[in-house]
Amino acid sequence: MRFCKKCVMPGTRPGINFDSNGVWYPCLNYEKRKFVDWDSRFKELKELCDKYRGMNGNGPDCMIAVSGGKDSHYQVHLMKEILGMNPILVSVEDNFPMTNAGCSNIKNISEEFGCELISMKPNRKLQKKLMRKTFEQYGKPTWYIDRLIYTFPLKMASKLNTPLLVYGENVSFEYGGADAVEHYSAKDIINNGVASDLAFDDLVDDEISIKDLSSCEAPTVDELAKIDPIYISYFIPWNSYENYLFAKSRGFKDLTHEWDRTHHIENFDQVDSRAYLVHSWLKYPKFGHASATDYAARYVRYGLLRKVRISGEILLG
């Protein structure tokens, strides 16, 4: 099996590409950070904030898509406490029982930072049908929720007249995907491959109509023209582990003493819903690597793990 020469990501990962030296693109992108003028980029972010600051009087002047997770905590801190914006938060819940940590974190992010939170509860009847269908036919049990996580904030930003919509990282650029060129705009976020690969016509049947899928539809051209969604990771050197340390200092709870997850080497990522445990368990039979590999690769890039090869074996330490 082929592995990235820098980290531990195997060649079985969907969409993986290596350069001529055998290094895959998230590792290459991470090395490029050394040449970025971060002061200049942060100045760009400040200018964007100034453009929209106070645009609705005393009402919200930006929107942040959150889950209640570690990265969400950092995003709200950055936008409200450092940049002085007045954000409104939007979230999508998935109708599954939440972990104790998840219940605490979504409340904490609103209380700790003093922000209003709009939370969407999906169509429960449709969710049962769609999750079963996408699981059995495509091995994607969380597709419906993932799709709403992308469509709901984009549509709400247009409806509530908060053009500045804030996302955390560009997952394609940071962790591997189709978006190899870094840019601040998140207008095309819905096409990053996470939930953009299933045709609606293939989902419609005797129990699921095209009307049922209306919330999953991408924003119209007119809706997109009204908003200015951004990736924070373009403006600052994004580090999900440092975000975790910060969030923990502000009341974020991980799964310590609650759940010892298999296929993971951390206890703080996607901890809110039990549904994503199924997503993680399916990763190995589908792709030949687990969530532990994703984070091990990330830790190597961050300098938190060291990769060595002894007698053909890849070891981490």
Image (cartoon, rainbow, N blue to C red):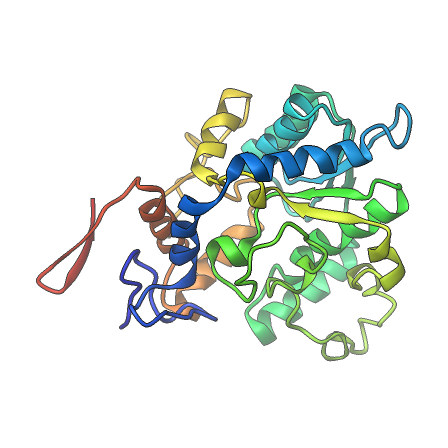
As drawn, 234 above or below 107: below
- Measured as percent of width and height from the top left, residue 103 is found at 62, 32
As drawn, 10 above or below 274: below
Q: Is residue 115 left or right of residue 9?
A: right
- Measured as percent of width and height from the top left, residue 101 is found at 55, 32
**Residue at 67%, 30% in the rendered image:** 79
Decide which of 106, 82 is in the foreground and name it: 82
As drawn, 300 above or below 140: above
**Residue at 82%, 44% in the rendered image:** 163
Quadrant (top left, top right, bottom left, bottom right) of the C terminus: top left
**Residue at 64%, 47% in the rendered image:** 96
Outermost residue toward the left in this view:
311
Q: Quadrant of residue 93?
A: top right
- Measured as percent of width and height from the top left, residue 91 is found at 72, 42
**Residue at 57%, 31% in the rendered image:** 74
Give the total of numbered labels: 0
Decide which of 62, 99 is in the foreground and name it: 62
Residue 99 visible? The answer is no
Decide which of 274, 294 is in the foreground and name it: 294
Residue 245 visible? The answer is yes
- Measured as percent of width and height from the top left, residue 1 is found at 27, 73
